[in-house]
Amino acid sequence: MDNQGVTADPQLQQFIEIESQKQRFQQLVHQMTEVCWEKCMDKPGPKLDSRTEVCFVNCVERFIDTRSCNTEDWSNGC
């Protein structure tokens, strides 16, 4: 039987797209955590010192900036 003319259920397509977006987001969060942890965390302890906290904040902001820029048209000034 040829299934080329059969279209998928729109609700199923929407569900798959939403789940794919969730997966991409989780991958980005994991990547950001890994990058910023390696860059900023010298010695784990019960509390972050101010230098480490600032490093994490800056790292996350730069990570978000670069990801946003990667998804936009480069001609928009990224």
Image (cartoon, grey):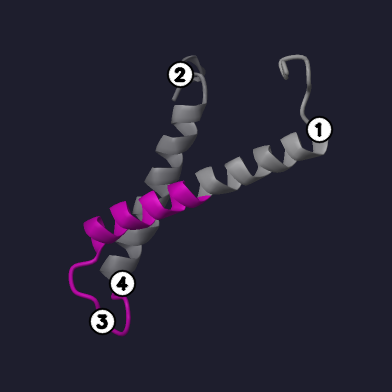
- Secondary structure beneath disc 4? helix
Question: Is residue 41 found inside the magenta-colored segment of the image?
Answer: yes
Q: Name the residue under label 3.
A: 45
- Which amino acid type is shown beneath numbered disc 4? Ser
Q: Is 56 situated left or right of 25 in this image?
A: left
Looking at marks 1 and 3 on the same chain, the residue that comes earlier in the sequence is marked by: 1
Which numbered disc covers residue 74?
Answer: 2
Looking at marks 2 and 3 on the same chain, the residue that comes earlier in the sequence is marked by: 3
Question: Is residue 15 found inside the magenta-colored segment of the image?
Answer: no
Residue 45: quadrant of the picture? bottom left
- Which amino acid type is shown beneath numbered disc 3? Gly
Number of other residues with Cα within 10 Å of mark 2, as a class: few under 14, some 14 to 19, many 20 or more = few
Residue depicted at x 45% and y 18%: 74
Rounded to the nearest whole Å, what is the CA distance between mark 4 and mark 1?
50 Å
Q: Mark 4 points at which residue?
A: 50
Rounded to the nearest whole Å, what is the CA distance between mark 4 and mark 3?
13 Å
Residue depicted at x 63% and y 46%: 19
Q: Name the residue under label 1.
A: 10
